[in-house]
């Protein structure tokens, strides 16, 4: 049955979670981008460090906790009432953001990187909760709507958080503004989480194992034994591999390949985020609330086709003149700019159509007592695939591939996702 997605936003069983997730993702990206900008322009120089190495280290520091803590997070989410655990996790976020404010005041890069690691850990604990709780409060034919809204909100929060963090951190009094903002967002998110209805305990007899390595392997082994869950997990992780590569290369693509300034880069980031959101929301209308993987192969096909078209759009345009960076308005003054923007939007929209049904399928196919641990396994795989994406992209760039050529390689390898997901239907 087709449900109105906007109607879910009026329901207490969904709206508080939606707000909590939106504010959390927004806060993560405000802090991360503010820290990256501050390191690049100020803190690295003060400490005598290479800013590129410090920024790369920051990316690794944030993603490492997903390997270390996701298994434990999944256990806690299955063992206890998910709403209560969410409130605890959001309360910890307030403490961490107060620590971030202290780090900005002290202008200590090492202290702020420690806070970044702890924020990654907090995100790792929240990850299984936000998706595993959806089937507790939503009917089966509402899961596509709920996942679409969560996915759209996540990417829009990434966009807005990245813009806000970069906009204010180097302004006059920027560290004070960012500090006030991240603490306020954390408090507001905690207040929103207090309205999330209780879920009960999915696996009250579960014994929490602290050995994260053993538990991580146990979760992966469980998934291997359940092929109906493993295949969608791998497909979701492939989405994050491709998406991470596109997002990571957008600044270089906009500046070097398109000859644009920061306005063009911002435009591309905005279009990509809006495209993911549009594709995610479109899933509910396409599937009419049914949890089916019908359109997932078409989403994979769209990613490859429009990435190929993007390659031709860039390589067939006029060569970029050195030192002639153009603004967003000039970039959109002729068809070639609009062609790139349209391709980027359609790549992202295809990604939304691809990933939302897969997330819903994992939730629906999981046993209630093991659902959060399955979501934790997805997060572990996502982190691994994103690391592979970063390493592979770096290798290709070292081999003198241009960014459009990198996108072409992604389009080619992504073709393999079409028969893979077609068999899952």
Image: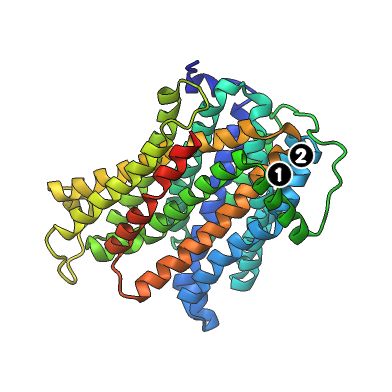
Q: Quadrant of residue 286?
A: top left
Q: Nearer the viewer, residue 204 or 411?
A: 411
Q: Quadrant of residue 87?
A: top right
Looking at the picture, how far across and down is residue 229, in whole percent? 61, 40
Which residue position holds label 2? 78
> Which residue shows up at 56% across the image and 33% down it?
360
Q: Nearer the viewer, residue 81 or 70?
A: 70
Task: Confirm whether residue 37 shows in the render.
Answer: no
**Horizontal arrangement in the rendering, residue 358 relative to residue 302 (left or right):** right
Looking at the picture, how far across and down is residue 307, in whole percent? 29, 51
- Total marks shown come to 2
Colouring style: rainbow
Task: Confirm whether residue 244 shows in the render.
Answer: yes
Which residue position holds label 1? 373
**Horizontal arrangement in the rendering, residue 78 relative to residue 365 (left or right):** right
- Taking 361 as reference, is 127 above or below it? below
| Residue neighbourhood size for the residue with mark 1, other residues' Cα within 10 Å, grouped as few (<14), some (14–19), many (≥20) | many
- Taking 272 as reference, is 317 above or below it? below
Query: Helix or strand or loop: what does disc 2 sit on?
Result: helix
Q: Which mark is residue 339?
A: none
Upstream in sequence: badge 1 or badge 2: 2
Q: Nearer the viewer, residue 76 or 100?
A: 76
Spatial CA distance of label 1 from label 2 is: 7 Å
Query: Helix or strand or loop: what does disc 1 sit on?
Result: helix
Residue farthest to the top?
1
| Residue neighbourhood size for the residue with mark 2, other residues' Cα within 10 Å, grouped as few (<14), some (14–19), many (≥20) | many
> Which residue shows up at 61% across the image and 67% down it?
113
Looking at the picture, how far across and down is residue 154, in whole percent? 51, 42
**Horizontal arrangement in the rendering, residue 213 relative to residue 12 (left or right):** right
Q: Are marks 1 and 2 in contact (CB under 8 Å)?
A: yes
- Taking 22 as reference, is 385 above or below it? below
Looking at the picture, how far across and down is residue 376, in whole percent? 66, 47
């Amino acid at each position: 049955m087709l449900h109105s997605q906007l109607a879910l936003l009026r329901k207490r069983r969904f709206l508080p979670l939606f707000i909590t997730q939106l504010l959390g993702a927004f806060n993560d990206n405000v802090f991360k981008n503010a820290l990256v900008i501050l390191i690049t322009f100020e803190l690295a120089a003060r400490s005598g460090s290479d800013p590129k190495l410090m920024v790369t280290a920051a990316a690794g520091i944030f993603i490492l906790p997903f390997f270390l803590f996701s298994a434990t997070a999944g256990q806690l989410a299955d063992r206890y009432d998910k709403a209560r655990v969410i409130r605890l996790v959001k309360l910890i976020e307030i403490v961490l953001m107060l620590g971030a404010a202290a780090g900005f005041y002290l202008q200590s890069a090492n202290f702020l990187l420690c806070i970044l690691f702890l924020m990654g850990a907090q995100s790792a604990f929240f990850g299984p909760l936000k998706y595993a709780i959806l089937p507790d409060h939503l009917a089966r034919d509402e899961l596509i709507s709920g996942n679409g809204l969560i996915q759209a909100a996540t990417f829009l929060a990434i966009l807005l958080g990245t813009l806000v963090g970069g906009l204010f951190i180097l302004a006059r009094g920027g560290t004070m503004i960012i500090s006030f903002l991240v603490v306020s967002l954390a408090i507001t998110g905690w207040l929103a989480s207090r309205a999330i209805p209780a879920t009960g305990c999915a696996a009250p007899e579960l014994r929490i194992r602290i050995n994260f390595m053993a538990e991580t392997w146990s979760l992966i082994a469980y998934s291997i034994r359940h092929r109906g869950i493993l295949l969608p997990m791998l497909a979701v992780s492939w989405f994050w591999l491709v998406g991470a590569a596109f997002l990571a290369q957008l600044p270089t693509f906009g500046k070097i390949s398109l000859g644009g300034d920061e306005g063009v880069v911002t435009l591309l980031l905005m279009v990509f985020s809006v495209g993911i959101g549009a594709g995610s929301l479109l899933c509910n209308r396409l599937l009419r609330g049914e949890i089916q993987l019908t359109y997932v192969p078409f989403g994979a096909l769209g990613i490859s086709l429009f990435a190929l078209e993007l390659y031709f759009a860039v390589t067939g345009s006029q060569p970029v003149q050195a030192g002639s960076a153009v603004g967003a308005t000039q970039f959109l003054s002729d068809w070639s700019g609009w062609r790139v923007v349209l391709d980027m939007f359609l790549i992202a929209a295809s990604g939304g159509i691809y990933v939302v049904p897969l997330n819903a399928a994992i939730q629906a196919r999981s046993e209630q007592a093991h659902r959060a641990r399955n979501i934790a396994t997805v997060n572990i795989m996502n982190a691994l695939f994103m690391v592979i994406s970063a390493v592979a992209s770096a290798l290709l760039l070292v081999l003198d591939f241009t960014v459009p050529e990198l996108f072409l390689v992604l389009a080619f390898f992504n073709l393999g996702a079409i028969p893979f997901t077609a068999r899952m239907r």
